[in-house]
Amino acid sequence: MDLSGIPVSRYHEALHRGEITCAATVEYFLHRIEQARHLNAYLEVFGSEALEQARKLDEQRKKGTATGKLHGVVFSLKDVICYKNHRATAGSRILSGFTSPYSATAVERLLKEEAIIIGRVNCDEFGMGSSNENSAYGKVLHPIDETRVPGGSSGGSAAAVKAGLCMISLGSDTGGSVRQPADFCGIIGLKPTYGRISRYGLIAYASSFDQIGILANHIEDVALTLEVMAGADPNDSTSSHNQVPEYSRLLQGSGKFNIACFHEAIRHPGLDREMAEKISHFIRQLKEQGHRVDILPFELMDYVAPAYYILTTAEASSNLSRYDAIKYGNRRHVGEDDITTFYKINRTTGFGKEVKRRIMLGTFVLSAGYYDAYFTKAQKVRKLVTDKILSVFKNYDFIIMPNSPVPAFKSGEKTEDPITMYLADIYTVMANMTGCPAISLPLFQHSEGIPFGLQVMANRFNELSLLRFSKQLLENNY
Ligand code: GLN
């Protein structure tokens, strides 16, 4: 039975009909992972453990005591999400050898619904990057065109889902790290509302932006995973108490919507011509189908990425100060020196180039002499962008735009030019700046032979309508 790309509902039917077992499913994925090792998507595979768990689930099913919504569903975890008694390194050397003493709330909730976690997948170090080239454990290859990057920072997650090396993957999205790799690899990537899913057990990059996200092949699977993980958590004071709808049961629905699109986004000089054309054509189709699509001005477009990089590096410089080689991770240097030298040597050798660049940037924008010129100003930009976006949602259901100005690019193409890499995040950071949910939908094919997606953003906590609309778009086959 071909299990790669199978939707959870069909898999469950096959299990109940006895056509397949959880153990055979895990074996299937283990075999595929082995065959695709060169992609470098997995950092660690929990093979025997996943098999054992699968056998237990098969037993339970036979006894009729298997009731989990995610019974036997095979997940991978981005290496920034903690799983009790398993290693977590955030793609960094500084955490090599670190074993998590607890599980993220999101992971606990998956396990409670009988999911199987098959391994942890590669990512850019501490989630910092857009190409998965910033991992201390090597780059990940694009599963369709191996000369290209799979996107980042959740590149391992996207590659694993696309290559059929798991059914669903959890990633994290601080400025696009779920949506952009989903876009590059041709799968679905959802970043929920800030606070929708607990961040407890998610290794922090920029805490007021970070959110766990879902990468999958089917919108129904995204909805189901979201409904299992979402909801208040006493361990994360920023998690929301808003009620969690049964997303997966309520997905059906059609309707005509008011959709906004920003002029500065689709007419951006950096946007690939072919992508711009295909998106414009898509907008015409939406109108023909009876939706209202208005092109609105968004004067703040050029400020979004710079403000994002000031605020997130500031938060990162603070969050990453905990890695002092005493409390966490690998102590490479144990000399007789004073404590400052000890920190310096361990942090210098433990962090990669990009992470160091960001710690320095963040420290600079927070320093006494520059705080107001950069940090305070960027916070003001965040407020202006948020006010603007929320005002758009008073009249519109969704905002659509690309996820990235270019499709999956060649490995090494942008590594020497961090500014170009940063500016490529213009479309995705908006949702994190404002806390809104946004999804990447694999709707298009580029003549370069790779897919690309459309980003749809909704108002805070409107995941249900976002998922419903996504289903409608995916089924329309543009
Ligand atoms: N590419 C963005 C960055 O490097 C997004 C990262 C993320 O969402 N974790 O910051």
Image (cartoon, rainbow, N blue to C red):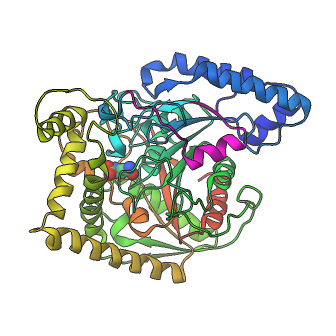
The image quadrant of residue 89 is: top left
- What residue sits 35% from the left and 43% below the top? 126
Q: Is residue 217 depicted above or below 192 in this figure?
A: above
Q: Position of residue 308 (x, y in %)?
A: 30, 62
Whether the magenta-drawn stretch holds residue 112 is answered as: yes
Between residue 256 and residue 13, name the one nearer to us: 13
Q: Is residue 36 depicted above or below 419 in this figure?
A: above
Q: Please indicate, yes or no, whether residue 164 appears anywhere in the rendered image.
A: yes
Between residue 97 and residue 453, name the one nearer to us: 97
- What residue sits 63% from the left and 70% below the top? 242
Q: Position of residue 297 (x, y in %)?
A: 36, 78
Whether the magenta-drawn stretch holds residue 364 is answered as: no
The image quadrant of residue 346 is: top left
Position of 152 with respect to 119 (left or right) is: left
Q: Please indicate, yes or no, whether residue 1 appears anywhere in the rendered image.
A: no
Q: Position of residue 150 (x, y in %)?
A: 41, 37
Q: Quadrant of the N terminus?
A: top right
Between residue 318 and residue 341, name the one nearer to us: 341
Between residue 359 and residue 122, name the one nearer to us: 359
Q: Magenta segment, which residues?
A: 97-118
Q: Is residue 298 depicted above or below 4 in this figure?
A: below
Q: Position of residue 287 (x, y in %)?
A: 57, 71
Q: How many marks?
A: 0
- What residue sits 76% from the left and 35% below the top? 11
